[in-house]
Image (tube, rainbow, N blue to C red):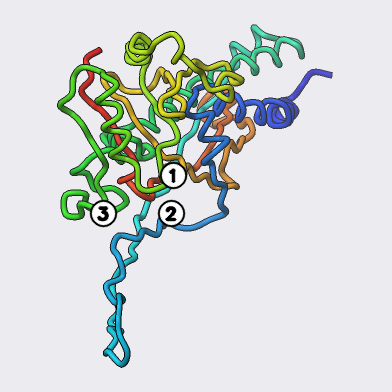
């Protein structure tokens, strides 16, 4: 008996969707780390509210004997608000293509090809989104929004609140170990240090040339995923094809998180036939938010001409 599209939908959801999730998040080095280290599944909320400590308590200190103690309330906590962002991929199969690819095996192979195309398209959208600069309003907020000094991030102005600014060097054009060390140190507060460095292949190769052969250590965890890496101050340096040109990022993954709605994460909507077209259509949906909880712990060089 020939497969119906209801049956193909069932096979697609059962076999392809779990693999799709793995392939997307394991396809690029930073996306792979996001999945393992900073992907948080939650079950609702109109937006993501990120609590922030932005000041020290002003009521306290040394005292003696019967001194009067300051009991005033000090405002020290606020929240950044990040909106959910929605992403989808469409899978359309024209009736004419369906007829050309007749037979059970042919139909399944054709659907598989369509799924692979949707996979590659969603990979590109997500990998671009995590580096976005805010110009695409419907995209997730990206690292170029966080790593700035004059953006509005999570509803909070970096211009008006210096504690919400990141550490940006836009004037250095030549990659040097000294420049990297300066930016790395700018993102260090006590024991809170960057956990990963991200850049494009060209600057990655320039960094490689700066290292002595005995310094060219790689990160074993990254290597297991099949990605290229070097090390800087004990953290992996990843070559990511979607990293913007001229940029090097230091990221603390304890404060940068990807939130996903557990009921809208790689959700497959089965094939249906529109009333006005001779096609079958299915979709894959996700709802996500990329959030920073402390921009001071991020740093970047944005003018490298390597």
Find disc 2 in the rendering and name its residue.
48
Residue occupying the point 27% across, 90% down: 68
SS at mark 2 in the image: strand
Residue occupying the point 26% across, 50% down: 164
Q: How many marks on residues?
A: 3
Neighbour tally class for label 3: few under 14, some 14-19, many 20 plus, Cα within 10 Å: some
Q: CA distance from mark 2 to mark 1?
A: 7 Å
Q: Is residue 245 visible?
A: yes
**Splitting the image into 4 quarters, where does residue 21 fall?**
top right
* Residue in front for this viewpoint, 195 or 256: 195
Find disc 1 in the rendering and name its residue.
289
Nearest to viewer (mark 2 / mark 3): 3
SS at mark 3 in the image: strand
Find disc 3 in the rendering and name its residue.
156
Q: Is residue 63 above or below residue 199?
A: below
The residue sitting at the bottom extreme is 66
Decide if residue 248 is on the left or right side of residue 158: right
Q: Position of residue 147 (x, y in %)?
A: 28, 38
Labelled disc at residue 120? none
Quarter of the N terminus within the rendering: top right
Quarter of the C terminus within the rendering: top left
The residue sitting at the right extreme is 1
Q: Is residue 195 above or below residue 199?
A: below
- The reply to whether dot 2 and dot 1 touch (C-beta < 8 Å) is yes
């Amino acid at each position: 008996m020939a497969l119906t599209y209801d049956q193909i939908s069932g096979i697609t959801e059962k076999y392809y969707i779990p693999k799709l999730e793995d392939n997307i998040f394991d396809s690029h080095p930073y996306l792979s780390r996001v999945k393992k280290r900073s992907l948080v599944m939650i079950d609702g909320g109109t937006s993501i509210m990120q609590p922030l400590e932005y000041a020290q308590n002003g009521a306290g200190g040394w005292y003696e004997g019967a001194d009067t103690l300051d009991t005033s309330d000090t405002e020290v906590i606020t929240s950044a608000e990040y909106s959910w962002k929605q992403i989808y991929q469409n899978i359309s199969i024209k009736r004419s293509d369906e007829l050309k690819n007749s037979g059970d095996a042919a139909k399944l192979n054709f659907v598989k090809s369509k799924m692979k195309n949707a996979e590659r398209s969603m990979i590109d959208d997500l990998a671009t989104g995590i580096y976005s600069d805010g110009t695409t309003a419907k995209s997730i907020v990206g690292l170029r929004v966080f790593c700035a000094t004059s953006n509005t991030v999570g509803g909070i102005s970096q211009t008006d609140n210096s504690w919400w600014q990141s550490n940006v060097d836009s004037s250095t054009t030549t990659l040097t170990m000294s420049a990297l060390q300066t930016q790395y140190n700018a993102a260090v507060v006590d024991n809170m240090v960057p956990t990963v460095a991200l850049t494009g292949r060209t600057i990655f190769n320039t960094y490689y040339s700066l290292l002595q052969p005995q310094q060219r250590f790689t990160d074993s965890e990254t290597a297991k995923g099949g990605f290229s890496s070097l090390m800087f101050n004990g953290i992996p340096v990843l070559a990511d094809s979607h990293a913007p040109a001229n940029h090097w990022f230091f990221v603390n993954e304890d404060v940068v998180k990807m939130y996903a709605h557990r009921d809208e994460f790689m959700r497959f909507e089965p094939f249906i036939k529109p009333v006005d077209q001779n096609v079958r259509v299915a979709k894959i949906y996700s709802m996500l938010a990329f959030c920073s909880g402390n921009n001071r712990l991020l740093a970047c060089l944005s003018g490298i001409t390597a």
